Amino acid sequence: MRDILKIEGGHKLNGTVRISSAKNAAVALIPASILANGPVSLVGLPNIADVNTLSLLLKELNVDVMFPSGGHIVIDPTNMLNNPLESDNVTKLRASYYFMGALLGKYKEVKIKCQVDVI
């Protein structure tokens, strides 16, 4: 039996959601955390290089990133700046494109490095 979560617009969301340590969830939730106005705590993250690379990209945006314990990250975008993401960290993983949507949602403008391979 599956649980169904219905969300209606026009109401402030509040609560806690537990998501298992799946890579695909982690690489989407970390960039999405910059949409918050205060600290976001993610628990149960897998110990993978992508999490580290995403945290480096957050730091390029002047976002405070803390790792209180294994699999736990606290992301505080309070002092975030819409800096261009042009370092090589952007091209290290495909999931960095999630920052495009989050930055566009927050600032209506984004500048991010892209790599085009010509064959």
Image (cartoon, rainbow, N blue to C red):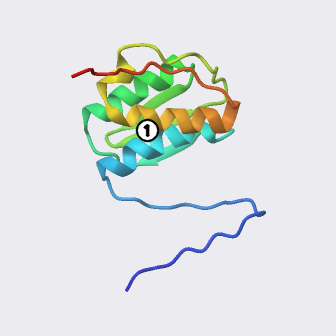
- Where is residue 6? Give x, y as percent: 60, 74
The amino acid sitting under disc 1 is: Ile
Q: 107 left or right of 91?
A: right
Which residue ends up furthest to the right in the rendered image?
A: 10
Residue 32 x/y as whole percent: 53, 42
Q: Describe residue 55's horizontal placement relative to residue 50 as left or right.
A: right
Name the image quarter holding residue 7: bottom right
Residue furthest to the left: 119
Reply above or below: 41 against 79.
Answer: below
| Quarter that holds the N terminus | bottom left
Between 49 and 72, the residue placed more toward the observer is 49
Residue at (55, 16) in percent of width and height: 84
Q: In this view, does 82 lie above or below 67?
A: above
Q: Position of residue 21 (x, y in %)?
A: 31, 53
- Can you say which quadrant of the picture contains the C terminus? top left
User: Toward the viewer: 96 or 29?
Assistant: 96
Residue 38 appears in which quarter of the rendering?
Answer: top right
Q: What element carries label 1?
A: strand
Q: Residues within 10 Å of mark 1 (few under 14, many from 20)?
A: many
Toward the bottom, the furthest residue is 1
The residue that appears at 41% across and 21% down in the rendered structure is 114
Q: Is residue 44 visible?
A: no
The picture places residue 86, in percent across and down from the top left corner, at 46, 14
Residue at point 43%, 45% (across, down): 28
Question: Which of the 4 image quarters holds residue 16?
Answer: bottom right
* Residue linked to disc 1: 73
